[in-house]
Image (spheres, coloured by chain):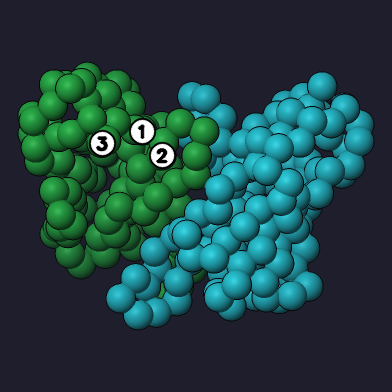
Chain colours: A cyan, B green
């Protein structure tokens, strides 16, 4: 599992509330990613990071922000949650070198429900 | 914009059959292609990674091929088992070095019956 954990694993919240999801990795990988998975759409990239304080937008970034103040933590924030953000959120890392260079490994996911 | 399609969307086979899952992509300028397995309610498990310069990769009963020029990849599963039942996802990578932006297909849901 490449030492990736996500918290919380499940969350139910109300429309308009802020929500922060955390991704934690233990192996000092430089690159980290946030995806969301929805039926009929597959996984889509929200934001990614290529180092501490270095982040950029992915395909579906509207309504989301991210922060990375330490190598091991990548936070995804929904500033004001909407029902369309009900989804399963996955964090991933990619490996920079070695036998599995460029391979992405995923965390267990966070199921978010916005009522 | 890269688009990834997986056919069929669902597949049901009896145990022991050899089977092929298909993945096609619209832009051949990819850096790599990765196959994943996802069990219901779980995360993604990486099965095979094929770099753009490679033609195939093998791991146990799994063999993945890549034809960049035609925009196609196949995942071959030999002697299928009930434990192979899962959704299989194909993703193409664009980027360089350790950084990859993956574009996913919507998956093939496989059911292997005893």
**Residue contact between numbered discs 2 and 3, judged by CB atoms under 8 Å:** no
Q: Is residue A71 or residue B85 the one in the foreground? A: B85
Q: Is residue B86 or residue A79 the one in the foreground? A: B86
Q: Quadrant of the N terminus of chain B?
A: top left
Which residue is identified by label 1?
Answer: B87
Dot placed on the residue nearer the N-terminal end, 2 or 3: 2
Residue B38: assigned label: 2
Report whether mark 1 lies on the same chain as mark 3: yes
Report whether mark 2 lies on the same chain as mark 3: yes
Report the Cα–Cα distance between label 1 and label 2.
5 Å
The chain holding disc 1 is: B
**Residue contact between numbered discs 1 and 2, judged by CB atoms under 8 Å:** yes
Which residue is identified by label 3?
Answer: B84
- Up-down relation of residue B100 to residue A36 (above or below): below
Residue B92 visible:
no
Q: Which type of secondary structure does the marked residue at label 2 adopt?
A: strand
Report the Cα–Cα distance between label 1 and label 3.
9 Å
Q: Is residue B57 or residue B2 the one in the foreground? A: B57
Residue A47 place in picture, x, y as percent: 65, 54
Q: Which type of secondary structure does the marked residue at label 1 adopt?
A: strand
Q: Residue at left 10%, top 41%?
A: B78
Residue A22 place in picture, x, y as percent: 73, 55
Residue A20: assigned label: none
Q: Residue at left 15%, top 54%?
A: B60
- Up-down relation of residue A74 to residue B24 (above or below): below
Q: Residue at left 66%, top 53%?
A: A6
Q: Residues within 10 Å of mark 2 (few under 14, many from 20)?
A: some
Q: Residue furthest front?
A: B114
Q: Which quadrant of the structure image shows residue A66?
A: bottom right
């Amino acid at each position: 599992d490449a030492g990736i954990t996500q918290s919380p694993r499940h969350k139910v919240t109300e429309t308009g509330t802020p929500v922060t999801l955390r991704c934690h990795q233990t192996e000092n990988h430089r690159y980290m990613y946030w995806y969301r998975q929805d039926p009929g759409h597959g996984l889509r990239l929200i934001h990614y990071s290529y180092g501490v304080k270095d982040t950029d937008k992915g395909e579906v970034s509207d309504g989301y922000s991210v922060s990375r103040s330490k190598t091991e933590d990548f936070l995804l924030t929904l500033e004001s949650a909407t029902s369309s953000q009900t989804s399963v959120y996955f964090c991933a890392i990619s490996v920079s070198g070695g036998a599995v260079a460029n391979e992405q490994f995923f965390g267990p996911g966070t199921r978010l429900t916005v009522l | 914009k890269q688009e990834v399609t997986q056919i069929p969307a669902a597949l049901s086979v009896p145990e022991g059959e050899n089977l092929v899952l298909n993945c096609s992509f619209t832009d051949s300028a990819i850096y790599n292609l990765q196959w994943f397995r996802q069990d219901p309610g779980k995360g993604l498990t990486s099965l095979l990674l094929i770099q753009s310069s490679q033609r195939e990769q093998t791991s146990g009963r799994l063999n993945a091929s890549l034809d960049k020029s035609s925009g196609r990849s196949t995942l071959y599963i030999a002697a299928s088992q009930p434990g192979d039942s899962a959704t299989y996802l194909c993703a193409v990578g664009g980027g360089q070095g350790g950084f990859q932006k993956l574009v996913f297909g919507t998956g093939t849901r496989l059911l292997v019956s005893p």
